[in-house]
Image (tube, grey):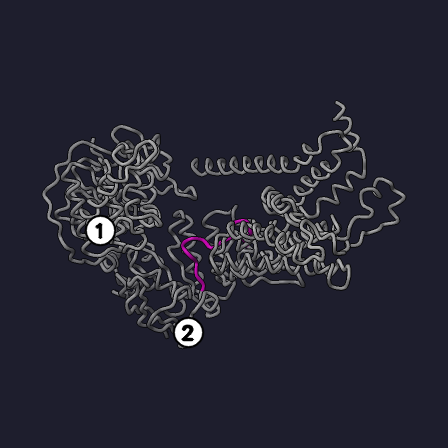
Amino acid sequence: MKILLALLEVFKNPAFYGSVLAVTPPLLFAALGCSVAQKADMTNMGMEGIMLISSFCGTLAAGYIGGPNPWLGLLVGVIVGALLGYLVAFFNLKMKVDIILVGIAMNLLGGGATAFFLPLVTPNHDRTSTNSIQSGILPLIKLPFLEKFPTLNAILNNQNVLTWISYIMIFVMAFLLYKTKLGLRIRAVGENSNAAESVGISSSKVKTIALVLSGILGGLGGTFMSAAYLSYFSNGITAGRGFIGLAACSMGEANPIPTALTSILFGFFYALSNYARTTGISDNIMKMWPYIATLIGVVIYSINKTNKEKKRRAQLSEK
Amino acid sequence: MENYLVMQDITRVYDNGCIANDKVNFSAKKGEIHAICGENGAGKTTLMKMLFGIEQPDEGKIIIKGQEVKLTSPTKAIEAGIGMVHQHFMLVPSLTVAENVILGIEPTKGMKFDMDKAVAMTEEVCKKYGFDIDPRARVEDITVGLKQKVEIVKALVKGCDILILDEPTAVLTPQETAELFVQLKLLRESGKTIIFISHKLHEVKELCDQVTVIRKGHTVANFSTEGVTEADISRAMIGVDIELQVAKTPAQPKENVMVVKDLVVNNYVGKKVVKNVSFSLRAGEIVGLAGVEGNGQREMIDAMTGLGVYAGGSITMLGEEVKTKNIKGLRKLGLVHVPEDRMTLGIARKMSIKENMVADKMDNPRYAGKIFMNKKTIQEDTDSFIKEYRVLCKNGEQPIFGLSGGNIQKVVVAREFTSYNRLVVVDQPTRGIDVGAAEFIRERLVQMRDEGKAVFLISADLGELMNLSDSLMVMHGGEISAYFPDITNLTEDELGFYMLGVKKMSDEEIRGALHE
């Protein structure tokens, strides 16, 4: 009862919703990135690794080139993400390695390489994070006119610029996938690559583009972790957010809007875990929530999908 | 009128040495519907793939409007004014009709894909050639007949002058077929050249002006459909080849092993492809099944062997309903199956010959206990199987995919024939394998029969069917169109008439296939 009251107190606090908005972006970037790849029938399992490496590279660039320069860090993060996306495409399409295996390799590489290079490239030979270099943080968006409305103010004011970009990205991706020629081709290739090939569309080219876009979004998500969520890179900074993004993508059936809504739901549980202390619930239990929510979500999704499939088959055999 | 399209001395040899086309000649005029007829594997599809740039000829020329062209990709073929409607639809189900139609040549407005323009383009073609399709409908929601029209519109919108239709009526109902023919005749009037691939002779006769017949990679005939009968075309298609004869004594059929009654099977799109078929397979008899591919045999065999489902009627094996058993249960009853697609269903490609040979025998205590396999007996038995079935290989440890097609088939046959069996279903057992291996397999089949097994032989090789079968059924349009309890006086010409639907036996005669 006490706990419920404490939770209620949290839900009444507008700052909590501001926190939801602030923790969702990396999940959102990851999920949108997975969804554009998924639409081209490429499961970007390596999202987590892409995010880690681009976060790492972005932080170094921001810290070493021109003193703290987070914008440069963002640019480098995005470029590295794009390159890694291309790498996934290259290994799968040219070298014919299974896409899931490429993804697993990317994740292992991400965790290992960043941990390995971290002490080599930091001045104090840091082992856990880039505390010894100043990489800065991307600016916050101040909306002074909101100060008159305390609730909205607590939710929307002083959010990071990249947070805003992440929500804008939902609509950008929806536009790209459903309103542009490229989007049409991505969807066509993903659903029936033979059909696309038969009218002269190169399916491997389209798939490569989709994965590069996916990598760019991964780069944005990775950079968010080290230049907005925190102000430095630390080992395993993404903490499974790439995988959660993948889960959100599959629950949203790779459609940008449902995928984004699922990501925000996961973000809600992340924020809740951050508020754990105030509720008196054990920190560790609250930290489990995002993962438990993911698990439940995926189970519900797959049950729905199996039922749909069963229904479809039943209809077929009736005819 | 001048020939609009000429394919001259086209030769295509596949990497495995199979000659698909051997100096094939084909030509078509502007504004005609030209049929290409031939059995499965005759080389029609290969020829068309070369015309549409999917494959390249090893020798020979393709000339369009007097100009030699090199068609190295579908894009090149489309540019040269060729459109193709594939047998399996090349459509994206979740996209709209208009989106499918303009895929590859998408109109844009600024950054956006211009949907209104796409709809307009689709409507324009539809109006010009009299198609009635809603451009904004989703392809997954429309009927098969409409999907086919979308395919045709898709080719027309790219401005094709030559339209290839690969067995377009295979998936259509009779009404849809009639409608398609009206449409195709309209297209002919507007000056399009249509290449119509089919083995339905009445359709060829009804629709086409010219017919070219291909047999075993050669052009064997070119008629104007005016002056020929369906029987003439059929004779040119089937031909007569003298085959090696396997010696056998007259059959002594005994009890029924499998009884199929009023069987109805639907295909994956829900179309009824096996229509109330009844027959029985008896111990000690080889029953042959002839028929042009795509007349329901595939679905019927899948249903009989437990690989597919059936919607109506019954299939019983030794009194047990096949539907209620899984494949393992069926095999316990004594059903063995040499599948047509041996690379997918017959073997595990990456495993050794030995492992493939005993893969189905793990329940047999001779080969495996509860946990461990019995290595020694497996070794001894596979060695003796390899010897008995004359599999050419170094030893049983060799991975199976390194073997030739014939030897792979011998491994499949060895595994199936050495399992407990009462009914042997063999589907195209000698397709694509060398003469020696084929003869060996045929001899084994006769031997199995003499041991009192029921044998069901499905084959596209009429020589093989005529030689091995004791009685013969013909399947056409999802029905048994003929049953010959005795085939001694049957000629291949006669068989061809039933296969192509020129003739059909009375219900009384067909009912003879079911032995009570």
The residue located at (57%, 35%) in the rendering is A299
Q: Which amino acid, mark 2?
A: Val
- For label 2, the crowd category at 10 Å Cα-Cα, with few meaning under 14, some 14 to 19 and many 20 or more, is some
From the image, tell me which residue sits under label 2: B69
- For label 1, the crowd category at 10 Å Cα-Cα, with few meaning under 14, some 14 to 19 and many 20 or more, is many
Q: Is residue A38 visible?
A: no
Q: What is the span of residues highlighted in magenta in the rendered image?
A: B83-97
Q: What x and y, as percent, mark residue A279?
A: 76, 30
Looking at the rendered structure, whether the residues under marks 1 and 2 are on a common chain is answered as yes
Q: Secondary structure at mark 1?
A: loop
Q: Is residue A188 visible?
A: yes
Residue B103 or residue B349, whichever sits in front:
B349
Q: Main secondary structure of the magenta part?
A: loop
From the image, tell me which residue sits under label 1: B391
From what the image shows, is residue A153 above or below residue B5? above
| Cα–Cα gap, marks 1 and 2 | 46 Å
Q: Report the quarter where the C terminus of chain B lies.
A: top left
**Residue, far bottom:** B67
